[in-house]
Image (tube, rainbow, N blue to C red):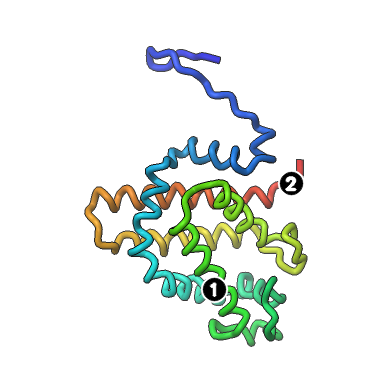
Amino acid sequence: MREESAGRTVDMQSIDESKLETDLAYRFRYVADFIGFTADDASTLLSVGMFLGPMIPELVDRTYRKLLDRDCTARHFLPRQSGFDGPTPKDLSAISVTHPQIQFRKEHLVRYLTTILGRTCDEKLVTYLDMVGKIHTPAAGNHDIDVPLVQMNALMGFLSDVLLEALLEIPVDDVTRKKVVRAFTKFLWIQNDFITRHYQPAK
């Protein structure tokens, strides 16, 4: 299909909307292309790993202090987490940043941040981004883990803010800093899509 726009003839892309729901790589390419996340943006993410890497422990600590500051988010750390075989908290009063299960979960966030900073945007990464969303719902197998979407959105908003705050401090020139901030912003929107897709009613 073609249409006239500002005196120019342009091609309108045809998108298979049903495929967006079944093909992760197709969905990633569609969202990335729509918001303008390019191969150069992907390379930009990799280029700042050397600066953000040492900041990851503090970013994770800040995130978990926020998560444990409210009962509605802290309660999701009471059930046994997949892969953890140590003692679980008996109630909210037993949860702290030093509890073994919280330490275990913090390691997962460290791994997530390390992964997005150190892996190219290939199909394996797309599958990983999708699993990040899925594991916060019963669809991943643990029916005790069912984090409401409002809390996932709040978490991603907070994580986005602390990451961008850190990026504003890295020792690069202003042109590079602008590229980095835009690349991360676009990437986090893609990640958020791969979270929210697991909260949609089955079609």
User: In the rendered image, which quarter contains the C terminus?
Assistant: top right
Q: Residue at horizontal 59%, vertical 60%?
A: 152
Local secondary structure at mark 1:
helix
Quarter-of-image position of residue 17: top right
Label ID, residue 107: 1
Q: Earlier in the sequence, mark 1 or mark 2?
A: 1
Classify 10 Å Cα crowding around label 1: few (below 14), some (14-19), many (20 and above). few
Rounded to the nearest angstrom, the CA distance separating label 1 from label 2 is 31 Å
Q: Is residue 60 above or below residue 171?
A: below
User: In the rendered image, which quarter contains the N terminus?
Assistant: top right
Residue 54 drawn at (x, y percent) = 37, 71
Local secondary structure at mark 2:
loop
Residue 69 drawn at (x, y percent) = 54, 76
User: Which residue is disc 2 drawn over?
Assistant: 201
Total numbered circles:
2
For the residue pair 186 and 118, the one nearer the viewer reads as 118
Which amino acid does the dot numbered 2 rest on?
Pro
Which amino acid does the dot numbered 1 rest on?
Glu
